[in-house]
Image (cartoon, coloured by chain):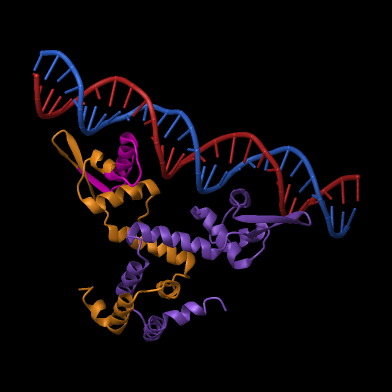
Chain colours: A purple, B orange, C blue, D red
DNA sequence: CACAATGTGCAGACTTTACTGCACATCATG
DNA sequence: CATGATGTGCAGTAAAGTCTGCACATTGTG
């Protein structure tokens, strides 16, 4: 059950996007201003929990995400669906479609996917 | 920005589903076993935050959700979409459709909705 | 009235998150 | 080798979230 606090998630986002970084580099790319020690505190927590690895390069450490973005995304979606959509992904999809005004191309894409579910499933891993 | 802690959310779920309840009734319907004082502690927090109202009936209080399920659902979805789908609801929809194997009837419902977006959009607002 | 059953108010304790501060380590370079 | 820039380790504070304990209030029934 992969779940992150807001602070942890923000750090993971940066690492997912940029790969292997030093603390100061994560700090620069952080969505809001954050002090270096605060940022390092998050990194330590994530390393302790096993979501991030680090290796020494020169005098500093490089940090890298171990937990994949896709995995975190799925487990977050899972709990949202359980909490609000009776555990049914289809309920969520229908709800979103009803709520959203989709552009022409988006509708076409949807119809294409709806028409060819097996094909899209097959090409998931290329 | 409506957001709940796990404990608060569990209480809200019970109230959303069952309407107006006494603490002991919420306790009975709670997803896991929970002691009465712990449960009441959650109720108090939710009342203090304005998400739940209560009124005295006999010697006890009846608790009722003020914040609507729909509203909490939306703001949770919003942060999930911002965190994992570039802020695009359509990205989420496409991702879900690609990931999910849908049944025949679900596909038909999807196609129907995709074909008549204006109708469903029109009857929502106004 | 007495009393058990049911409920309430409230003061906490314990845990997890979120952050701060500072002394010490490494290293290029003048 | 002295120094300043850059990093690290670690202790500690503060606030939020979770949960407990217990004294007191209300009500139905004998």
Viewer-side residue, A42 vs A107: A107
Query: Left or right: B36 with respect to B62?
Result: right
Residue A126, placed above or below residue B69:
below
Residue at figure coordinates x 53%, y 59% from the top left:
A10
Residue C12, placed above or below residue B99:
above
- How many numbered callouts? 0
Viewer-side residue, C21 vs A9: A9
Residue A17 percent location from the top left of the image: 59, 67
Decide if residue B10 is in sight here: yes
Query: Left or right: D13 with respect to D23?
Result: right
Decide if residue B51 is in sight here: no
Q: What range of the chain is rendered magenta?
A: B29-54
Residue C2 percent location from the top left of the image: 15, 13
B48 within the magenta span: yes
Residue B53 percent location from the top left of the image: 23, 46
Viewer-side residue, C27 vs B93: B93
Q: Quadrant of the C terminus of chain A?
A: bottom right
Residue B90 percent location from the top left of the image: 41, 75
Quadrant of res A33: bottom right
Viewer-side residue, B90 vs B100: B100
Query: Left or right: B97 with respect to A57?
Result: left
Residue at figure coordinates x 38%, y 86% from the top left:
A108
Residue B50, placed above or below residue B68:
above
B104 within the magenta span: no
Residue at figure coordinates x 19%, y 47% from the top left:
B20
């Amino acid at each position: 059950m992969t779940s992150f606090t807001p602070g942890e998630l923000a750090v993971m986002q940066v690492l997912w996007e940029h790969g292997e970084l030093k603390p100061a580099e994560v700090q620069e790319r952080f969505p809001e201003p954050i002090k270096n020690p605060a940022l390092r505190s998050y990194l330590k927590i994530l390393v302790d929990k096993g979501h991030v690895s680090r290796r020494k390069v020169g005098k500093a450490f490089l940090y890298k995400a171990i937990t994949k973005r896709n995995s975190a995304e799925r487990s977050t979606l899972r709990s949202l669906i359980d909490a609000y959509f009776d555990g049914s992904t289809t309920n969520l999809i229908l709800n979103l479609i009803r709520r959203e005004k989709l552009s022409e191309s988006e509708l076409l894409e949807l119809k294409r996917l709806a028409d060819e579910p097996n094909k899209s499933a097959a090409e998931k891993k290329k």
